[in-house]
Amino acid sequence: MQKAIVGLAVITGLTLGAGAAEASQYLRIGAVWEDSRSATFLDRNCEPTERAALFGCDDGDDGLPIGARGDFGRGTGAQLGWGVHLGEMWRTELELTYQPGLEFQGNSNFIDTGEMQPASGSLTQYRAGVNVYLDLAAALARDAGTFEPYLGAGASAVRNRISTMRYEFPELESQPAETTVPGGSSNHLGWMVTLGTGIELSPRNLIDIGISWNDHGRVETPVGEIDIIRSGESVAQVEVESTRSRLETVGLMLSWRHYLR
């Protein structure tokens, strides 16, 4: 489904560009910095029929459903966009984003394994989306000078790739003690809203600065064998169902916008 969405986005963007012969087209190159919101890994299904669940449906010693709670931290990424103006107030843009810098850090709450149960895994993300922007100065019939304030919204196809997840149990006697869960990739729909401004450097060049709220879908570990390690040795491999967590971030964007004509 995501391939179809990306293909539709590309076709839509090319059609808009071809149909807007008098419109201004531009390239945008920039960087993003994102700060993740709280995240919780839980079983996709805590009562699977064919294999075991990693966490299960019980509550931990803290009274919360067993899982891993934390966040994906902060990280930087790169963006490339191609856009076209649709009249004075509107512009649309195709955007590609590569975000390699996020990492889950949290604590799990398995029963009878102590209060400190660090959980971790690194994340790499790829996004392809379509954005629409409203020029606020044009919409309000105001002259903002060298500034071009705007509101924007977008939808994207997101590929989240999580590395091997590690669940450590430093309070157990049989050290080192951990459980590793295989990593994998999953595809989801995402969306964002943004508020920003362009700052004119010359008639064909602007600096874009913006802040955004992003929903990047879910991060999922696949069905696979976990490895239970005690005293530094593997004691069991068990096939378990997938786990997942939602990924939401607040982002800052800084980029260069260059008009082709």
Image (cartoon, grey):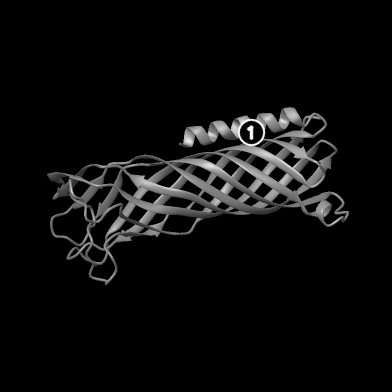
The image quarter containing residue 80 is top right
Identity of the amino acid at label 1? Thr
Q: Residue at x 23, y 52 (%)?
A: 54
30 displayed left or right of 202: left
Mark 1, Cα crowd under 10 Å, few <14 / some 14-19 / many 20+, is some
Residue 209 vs residue 25, the one in the foreground: 25
Q: Name which residue lies at 28% across and 41% down.
A: 182
Image quarter hosting the N terminus: top left
Quadrant for residue 111, please give it. bottom left
Q: Quadrant of the C terminus?
A: top right
Given residues 84 and 195, the one toward you in this image is 84
Residue 155, horizontal then vertical, whole percent? 57, 45
User: For mark 1, what is the residue?
Assistant: 12
> Residue at image x 54%, y 45%?
76
In this picture, residue 245 sits left or right of residue 256: left
- Residue found 52% across the figure and 36% down from its top: 5
Q: Is residue 47 above or below residue 115?
A: above
Q: Position of residue 151 (x, y in %)?
A: 70, 53
Circle count: 1
Q: Position of residue 57 (x, y in %)?
A: 23, 61
Up-down: is 173 above or below 191?
Answer: below
| x then y, percent, for residue 119 | 31, 54
Considering every residue shown, the one lying at the far bottom of the view is 63
Horizontal arrangement in the rendering, residue 229 relative to residue 38 (left or right): left
User: Among all residues in the image, which is located at the extreme left?
Assistant: 235
